[in-house]
Amino acid sequence: MLSSPDVMACSRTCSRILGLSLGTTALCAAGTNMVLLLPNWDVTYLLRGLIGKHAMLGSGLWGGGLMVLTAATLISLMGWRYGCFSKSWPCRSILTALLSSGLASLGALICFITSGVALKDGPFCMFDGSSFNQTQAWKCGYPFQDLHNRNYLYDHSLWNSVCLEPSKAVIWHVSFFSTLLCISLLQILLVVIHLINSFLGLFYSLCEK
């Protein structure tokens, strides 16, 4: 059976791994959001304003990215016991764990909600308004919001027929916002594991004393 020092060492190792994993997901989220700002790898769409509000909000950059990366740094510092964490009291350790978990959870949750709404609304693109009984022929907007009887996520025949510009706007939108959705879910899972690991480490440190 593992002794308290063994469990504490295992808890610190787990914190290092969790910190590294969260940091990696944060960089992936930031990178994915950057790609959403460059449809078809073309910066002209960003300069012309043909980028949707969900991508421009940048929740993958500052939410699932910066906020989670900050939390991951705190978690890693706890694992390696750098600086003020070298001989931290239990209260300080649990406060740091709660702070890092809350920060990462908030960032991941914002990214998750934004990605879900973005997938529901569909991409921002230039489309033929006459096919939607609108007076303006070519229009920029969210054409799939007006399709109340059809869900574009399941009707792939709409993917290449509605958005005129950027080309393949639907595939780009669905692919990368789905990626952001999965990354934020993974981040939330890692935060839950971090909380469990932190409380176990605190419990055994108190038992040791």
Image (cartoon, rainbow, N blue to C red):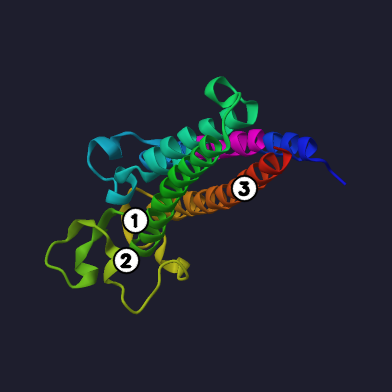
Q: Does residue 162 appear left or right of residue 66 in this picture?
A: left
Give me the residue at 48% from left, 41% from top. Answer: 29
Residue 82 against residue 146 in the figure, above or below: above
Residue underneath mark 3: 199
Secondary structure found at label 2? helix
Residue 186 vertical position relative to residue 86 in the rendered view, above or below:
below
Which circle's residue, 3 or 2, is located before the other in the chain? 2
Query: In the orientation shown, which residue stands out farthest toward the front?
Result: 209
Whole-percent x, y for residue 118 in the image: 36, 57
Could one spot residue 76 in this view of the protein?
yes
Spatial CA span between label 1 and label 3: 42 Å
Q: Amino acid at mark 2?
A: Phe
The secondary element bearing badge 3 is classed as helix
Percent x, y of residue 131: 24, 69
179 above or below 11?
below
Q: How many marks?
A: 3
Residue 94 counted in the magenta span: no
Boundaries of the magenta span = 15-28
**Residue carrying label 2:** 144
Disc 2 vs disc 1: Cβ atoms closer than 8 Å? yes
Residue nearest the viewer, comparing 98 with 89: 89
Q: Amino acid at mark 1?
A: Pro
Residue receiving disc 1: 123
Mark 1 in CB contact with mark 3 (< 8 angstroms): no
Label 3 crowd (10 A; few <14 / some 14-19 / many >=20): some
